[in-house]
Amino acid sequence: MNLNDAKIGEKVKVVKLHTQGALKRRIMDMGITKGAEIFIRKVAPFGDPLQINVRGYELSLRKCDAANIEVE
Amino acid sequence: MVTKIALAGNPNSGKTTLFNDLTGSNQYVGNWPGVTVEKKEGKIQGHEDAILMDLPGIYSLSPYTLEEVVTRNYLINEKPNAIINIIDGSNLERNLYLTTQLLELGIPVIVAINMMDIVKKRGDKIDTAKLSKAIGCEIVEITALDGTGTKELINKVVKLVQNPKKKVPKGIFSPEVEKALSSIEDQLPKEIDITQRRWYTIKLFERDKKVLKELNIDSNVDGIITFVEKTLDDDSESIIINERYNYITETIKGIYVKKNGSDLTTSDKVDAIITNRWLALPIFAVIMFSVYYISVTTVGTFVTDFTNDTIFGEWIIAPLGAWFESTGVSPWLSGLVVDGIVGGVGAVLGFVPQMFVLFFLLAILEECGYMSRVAFILDKLFRRFGLSGKSFIPMLIGTGCGVPGVMASRTIENEQERRMTIMTTTFMPCGAKLPIIALIAGALFGGAWWVAPSAYFLGIGAIVISGVILKKSKMFAGESSPFVMELPAYHIPSSKSVFKSTWERGFSFVKRAGTVVLLSSMIIWFLSNFGMANGSFGMVEDMDHSILSVIGGIVAPLFAPIGFGNWQSAVATVMGILAKEEVVAVFGVLYGITGDALSIVEEGSFNQLGTIAAHFTPLAAYSFMIFNLLCPPCFAAIGAIMREMNNAKWTWFTIGYQFGLAYAVSLIFYQIGLFLSSGVFTFGTAAGFVVLIGMLYLIFRTPNTNETNKRNKMKLYPEVE
């Protein structure tokens, strides 16, 4: 499944990144790499973006970008 | 010999606090040439020959963002003597990611682990001695907030600079990659110094566009890279990033010991409330309202009025004028100094206290970490218009005064969003525009309740429309900036940083008033007080005969299509560019109102303004209001725009765009309004419809998708070499 499908409070592991270009670089720079563990903390009041915990810190990510991250 | 030391680290790692601690007040703030990235350098206290260069907060040294490119270029080309890499101990893995890249540059690095107090509070442990051995450079524990460890840090840096050991960076990647890297290294030009070869090799392996352009290597290298990509089934850039993080994860095993169980920290608990699905917006509204209320409505207005009326009015202008008279100084000099210079500059400086209060409150919100939550909450709403959630703050401040509003756009990291925010912030009616609204509402609409709110909606509408139109234009095209943003832990703001930020921003504004406004005050004063009277050139009693009125007369026809083609309105509009309150004052003078028109409007005795009303139809008056609300604001605000854009082309574009939009909207409104009320279809009406259709097209068109796709792939910044 993809990261945007995960439920709040779930813990997932990154399988593959389908993002392209500079955005992929940015996402990986921030620590979302193959095998990284992600915890879905919450969702913003208007429904987007997501707040996740990765490598020990809080990161916000848009659902459309999370859709390109394959997790299990 | 001047020693250059670079300070690099992630955003929110306490870098600014450390920088302030090390340099005290010996700082210089500017911009990197041609870009909106701030450049800070200062002398290290106690070491007069050492300059500390504060590099932008970055997460990596990729070629994709301005901040990263500016930093890379500095480190490679300027070759500082040492780098202080400040890292957040409570966030070790991601911080070390940058560290591994800094270590490849061949410049001596010292790591300063900050926020160890937070680490200890959490019950975690970091074995810095072991870590230092593992990564191969010295580590100093510091708490930037109270200066703990900073003396030791500087001593170690000085020692490092005095005994530079040429270290060749160690290999941290997998055998396949290291093998490829050494083959690539053989192909590097001999001129590249041994300390920098590792950096260039890795960049070539990553197919870094900037380095490829710089070096012009033959395609042999590409074959080596492709081979590894096939073997490891991933692109070279991703391979490097993955292996970096793998290296870090492996290395910190046994060094970074987390306390058992995952308790929520205090910061997490606070955050759970502040960004709670139901509470977030109400809390946000309350906070914003309070900031606005304190800085603009209560303390702000009180202090500004005091400054304007008392300090300038009573203490300076009146006695100065009297002194001039008593010493028999010629009227033009006294007029120039008292009315032109002191009056003009004083009006702008009157805003200074209000601005300081505003900046102070903003700095607190920024320092404690709340601003990123604002961006988080508002993102969905704002990104449609090419703006960031953080664009809200400048606009909110802009309802008080556009100058600090524009300056507040500095917190927006993405350059495009920043530029867009700067361009649209001043559409919001500021405090100085209120008298215009009140005048029109009172004198021409009988004090109707809906006029004022309509002005605010006009502002919001202009911002939204501009966002949509500009976003589709070539200059801003492309994916909205990736909203991949760290939400740093909350912490109590350091009073030192808050005061520093407040002072720095406030003083910027003062400098702006001191230069641009001074000059323009003098010019406008001259133009409005000199002209042809009785056949000779000299000071005139009546503005009717001044040069300005002549200019007004020449320019007036331009305003005819939008309803106010008389020279008085033209003059008032021009004076409005000096300070928007001048519009009302000038009308008062030109239409022969006894007394100060501004205070009459403030009091609300609108029947005294009959002469003004007689010259306008309601339609024309509202059109006049539209134009003055949307056109470029006062010189002080233009000055702020100039400073924040840091680019002449963009500044002129902003001014041109604002004039254009103001004219277009007024035209559409006036001409179509005229048509609807009179039923007569004139050439003007046709023009109005044409402009309306043009605007609708710009708003609703789908941009050229090919261009958009090309830009999505790699976002490079050609203007940064």
Image (cartoon, coloured by chain):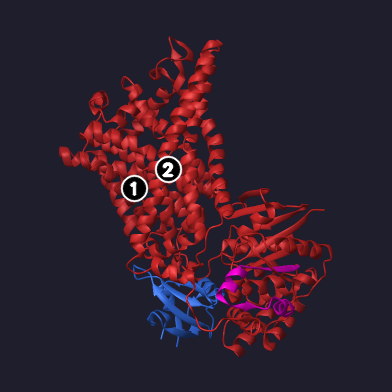
Chain colours: A blue, B red
Would you say the residues marked 1 and 2 are in contact, meaning their CB atoms lie under 8 Å apart? no
Residue B579's label in the rendered image is: none
Q: How many numbered tags mark residues here? A: 2
Q: Amino acid at mark 1?
A: Gly
Picture coordinates of residue B547, whole percent (x, y): 44, 22
Residue behind mark 2:
B401
Which residue corresponds to the image point at 74% horizontal and 61% vertical from the top-left?
B154
Q: Is residue B223 left or right of residue B391?
A: right
Position of B60 relative to B679 (above/below): below
* Vertical order, B411 against B308 (above or below): below
Residue at left offset 59%, top offset 61%: B67
Which element carries disc 2, helix, strand or loop?
loop
- Separation of residues labelled 1 and 2 (CA atoms): 14 Å
Along the polypeptide, which appears first: circle 1 or circle 2? 2
Same chain for labels 1 and 2? Say yes or no.
yes
Which class describes the residues within 10 Å of circle 2: few (<14), some (14-19), or many (20+)?
many
In the displayed structure image, the side of residue B441 where residue B499 appears, left or right = right
Mark 1 vs mark 2, foreground winner is 2
A62 lies above or below B378:
below
Which element is circle 1 on?
helix
| The C terminus of chain B sits in image quarter | bottom right
Task: Locate residue B323: give its quadrant.
Answer: top right
Residue flagged by tag 2: what amino acid is it?
Cys
Q: Does the segment drawn in magenta span residue B256?
A: no
Is residue B126 in the magenta section?
Answer: yes
Q: Which residues are magenta?
A: B108-135
Determine the chain carrying the residue at label 2: B
Residue highlighted by disc 1: B459
Query: Residue at left 74%, top 79%?
Result: B133
Q: Position of residue B150 (x, y in %)?
A: 70, 61
* Crowd band around label 1 with a 10 angstrom C-alpha radius: few (<14), some (14–19), many (20+): many
